[in-house]
Amino acid sequence: MSIIVAEGVTKRFSSDSRPAVDAVSFAVDPGEFIVLLGPSGCGKTTLLKMINRIYEPTSGQLLIDGVDSRSLPVTHLRRRIGYAIQQTGLFPHFRVEQNIAVVPRLLGWERPRIEARITELLDLVGLPHDFRRRYPRQLSGGQQQRVGLARALAADPAIMLMDEPFGALDAITRARLQDELLHIQRKVHKTILFVTHDIEEALRLADRMMVMNHGQIVQFDTPLTILTRPCTRFVEQLTSANDVLRRLSLLTVASALGRERPPAAGGSADLPPLHPQDDLRFALTQLLGAGESSLPVIDDGREVGRLTLADLRAMLPSTVAGLEGHVPVSGA
Amino acid sequence: MGYLLTNWAYVGTLLLQHLWLTGSAMAISVVIALPLGVLLARVAWLRGPVLGFLGLLYTIPSLSLLVLLIPVLRLGYWPAVVTLVIYAQLVLVRNVVVGMVGIDPAVIEAAHGMGMNSWQRLVQVELPLALPLLLAGLRIATLSTIGIATIAAFVNAGGLGMLLFDGVRTSNHEKIVIGAIAVSLLAIGANVLLRRAELWSQQSRG
């Protein structure tokens, strides 16, 4: 059963003639990592904040675990949903341990259980235990965001909402935290809704991407499908689908190889091997450099297939020519 | 100094009266200003009118306010304390409002997002974060209250103002100087104590 179901959810702000979120419907399965992607003002953050009722929908219905979110007291709903935001919103007068303990304390957990949970979470997000007694101001931006993540995870909520949590970090810290978030997600299997306007972050993290524009969902599908079969010109431009090299750099050898490919016979010892996690731009460089029409793909010392130029071509959108008449991007 | 040596008990009594006047006035002031400030921080449209009204009261000369209160409250302690409370409101209320409104919106959003109710947000987040500004307001209001409290002598409420009024009436410069010095020392002492509390409140967050 879907853990989050939206039915015709609309949000109108009185100051705006057009709805910020316009009759949106979707369903999310438990354990999915969903990334909401789109230009500023597309409604992605508004949609996210309707799930924990920071904003109340003007119309439509949101079901959390099959229950109408409005039927619960709002504080109870929010204590069951993890929430992490870009500016972290850590309480500056609380030590790291107190910040992490906020929701467990609101839920009335026993002291020993909270203490054990703090230790567990510091380990999970990769912070040393002696950070417990520090104040947020004594931490770097990346460390603060780790505390923010630990705080959101504290009461072990099934659903996590993350509003551009890495948006204010430098590129290196951001990439490291993205990796660790994926690593954590493999352990905890939360249902995550993650807002970003960074396409590379979206491709890196998402099981499925919800591309939004003008308050509506334009396409909701896997990163691979969105890159290879963008359904409108808008999605294509957002993902720079017409820039071949950029597109290839966003895809892995594994995604081009597919699963059904039987390993070919040997005779490739002198060729530069590819790994499944290499990006396709690198693969193209290797192919052109070696002057070959195909290269072996090696995983754990074993050849799992051969990548050909035809495979690369197949990863480029076949629909680029047939997309006239769709919403153009303005100021995105 | 001869006057002080022969009348130390009297001066001491006046000092204690002054402390009591100021202290009780500040206690009553905070009890009124804190909820009022919180209300104004939550209800934005009330801010302009209420702060405007408090500002208006603040511009009334203290002596005339005191005289205006005599028909209602007679002479003695009460008209003096009511006057002091009225004067302290503007600074106290304004600092509570500024302290609460100035909190990082992300912190407030996080407090909402984690499921705090209005009371938990106020007690655990907003008031502690507004505390440094609240204490700054308390310090400024206390200092001006110590000064204004000298006119309490005018309505028979005692205090160090007695020395000043007597001194002026009888052209006794010694009394005036001793009264002025005593008021100043009281103000300086209050300033040091409250400033220390203010610094403490700022340090307790790393």
Image (tube, rainbow, N blue to C red):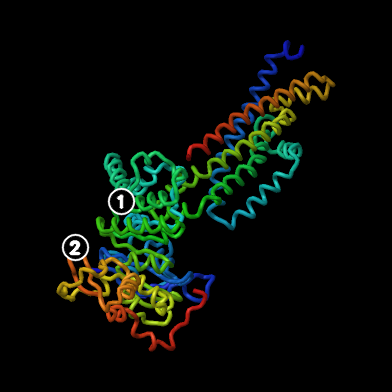
Q: Which residue does the numbered mark 1 point to in the structure image? A: A155
Q: CA distance from mark 2 to mark 1?
A: 42 Å
Compared with B183, A72 (above or below) is below
Residue B57 image-quadrant placement: top right
- Nearer to us: label 2 or label 1: 2
* Residue B140 visible in rendering: yes
Q: Residues within 10 Å of mark 1 (few under 14, many from 20)?
A: many
Residue A327: image location, x then y, percent: 45, 83
Residue A139: image location, x then y, percent: 44, 45
Residue A100: image location, x then y, percent: 36, 47
Q: Which residue does the numbered mark 2 point to in the structure image? A: A301
Indicate the amino acid at tag 2. Answer: Gly
Q: Secondary structure at mark 1?
A: loop
Q: Residue furthest right?
A: B171
Subunit that carries the residue with mark 2 = A
Q: Nearer the viewer, residue A146 or B82?
A: A146
Q: Which mark is residue A13?
A: none
Q: What residue appears at the point 47 percent right and 54 percent down from the top-left corner?
A: B106
Comes first in the chain, label 2 or label 1: 1
Q: Are marks 2 and 1 on the same chain?
A: yes
Q: What residue appears at the point 58 percent right and 36 percent down from the top-left corner?
A: B28
Indicate the amino acid at tag 1. Answer: Ala
Q: Secondary structure at mark 2?
A: loop
Q: What residue appears at the point 48 percent right and 40 percent down from the top-left corner?
A: B205
Residue B110 image-quadrant placement: bottom left
Q: Nearer the viewer, residue B70 or A37?
A: A37
Subunit that carries the residue with mark 1 = A
Residue A108 image-quadrant placement: top left
